[in-house]
Image: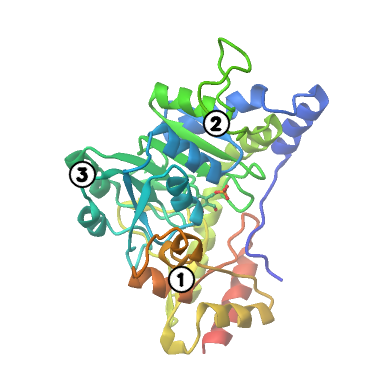
Amino acid sequence: MIPVNEPSIGERELEYVTECLRTGWVSSAGRFLEDFEQAWAAYCGMAYGVAVCNGTAALDVAVNCLSLGPGDEVIMPSFTIISCAQAVVRHGARPVLVDCDSETWCMDGEAVRAAVTPATKAIMVVHMYGHPVDMDQIQAITLDHHLTIIEDAAEAHGSEYKGRRCGGFGDVGIFSFYANKVVTTGEGGMLLTNDEGHAADARAYRNLCFRNDRRFYHTKLGHNYRMTNVQAAIGLGQLERVDEIVDHKRRMAAEYARRLADLAGLQLPSEREWARSNYWMYAVVVDEATGLTGETFSAQLKQRGVETRPFFLGMHEQPAFHRLGLFAGESYPVTERISRQGVYLPSGNALTALQVEEVCAAILEVIK
Ligand SMILES: Cc1ncc(COP(=O)(O)O)c(C=O)c1O
């Protein structure tokens, strides 16, 4: 089976983790944590990094930093992972969904503008599968309406919008370092910001809102969302190779595109002229005219030794939100279509050109 994802862990990660184990710095303090936070923030052009235990927690921290709560609306794509809408709901604010662009699969900027109301406080931008959102368009809306931006760059390590790295545009930006991400810490996440106050709030919130002046005296509630020094050690080792990993992803994407470009019935990922995608996952949408759905396409590829994953299911189609009285009767046609017809192909950091050739040969058999 050609796996959909495989991390590549190098010698440097091993060396750094061994240092943690040998010195006993295995918990949530240590030099790798500070180094990783600073290095990741610098890589993305932000001043402060706050490492947490996963990207879902980072989104929760982000919503908390911006003090979003009851009565506030946050505009976000329907086509995303549940962590985004869940973070907003858990703070009592309301997610307002918009559909995505049919080519980049990122939130549609015109739809965002149309969704602004007097209750809108923030826009949650999600760079989908590594392709950046058109940030000029979003920033124009936030300036016109005095809104803040949460930038979810979980999938967009090293992706660029007009030459600037994703994760460096929002009031707060977040990342996931789950094992399938470009840079992994096993499980992990980070919040980035240029605002010292947000950074201080995030540090407190991830650590049960302990106070410096009086131990075990709490004036606010937080969480234990801490990252360990061991995780940060892996992340720091990975970060030293991030350009190499992104280049590899882009080479594999070019190889897929070269072999599949002439195949009718399969939509390939696009890259706008202002974008440099990291091609985190090589995602494709199969045309209904082939008689296939994403699910049947996946099943047939599996029979040929190729592992795939389905696209996200829209937030408006989640029973968990319907039960809370959210999104009833809402429809987002692009989201609905791609969530049924989309899959992502093997895209791991250890994928070889030969494996891409084998995947493409299997696809040609299935679609022809
Ligand atoms: C866009 C996006 N945001 C947030 C997350 C949540 O990250 P984690 O899995 O680390 O909780 C993910 C996870 O893959 C994601 O794809």
Q: Is residue 291 visible?
A: yes
Q: What kind of element bears circle 1? A: helix
* Image position of 173 (left or right of 38): left
The residue singled out by tag 2 in the image is 222
The residue positioned 68% from the left and 32% from the top of the image is 228
Residue 326: x percent and y percent?
39, 60
Q: How crowded is mark 3: few (under 14 residues within 10 Å), some or many (20 or more)?
A: few
Q: Specify which label sits upstream in the sequence, 1 or 3.
A: 3
Kindly indicate whether the residue at mark 3 contacts the one at mark 1 (C-beta within 8 angstroms): no
List x then y, in percent, for residue 13.
70, 37
In 3D space, how far apart are the residues under numbered discs 1 and 3 (Cα atoms)? 29 Å
- Mark 2 or 3, nearer chain start: 3
- Identify residue type, mark 2: Gly
Q: Callout 3, which amino acid?
A: Ala
The answer to whether residue 215 is above or below residue 71 is above
Circle 3 SS class = helix
Amino acid type of the residue that numbered disc 1 sits on in the rendered structure: Ser
Name the residue beneath numbered marker 1.
Answer: 339
When asked about the image quadrant of residue 78, the answer is bottom left
**Farthest residue, direction left:** 144
Question: Is the CB–ligand 1 distance for label 3 below 8 Å?
Answer: no
**Residue drawn where x is 42% and y is 82% of the image:** 287
- Kindly indicate the quadrant of the structure image that contains residue 297: bottom right
Residue 14, x across and y down, in percent: 75, 37
Among the two numbered marks 2 and 1 on one chain, the one whose residue lies closer to the N terminus: 2
Q: Which residue is tagged 3?
A: 140
Q: How many marks?
A: 3
Task: Give how far apart the Cα atoms at labels 2 and 1 are.
Answer: 34 Å
Disc 2 element = loop
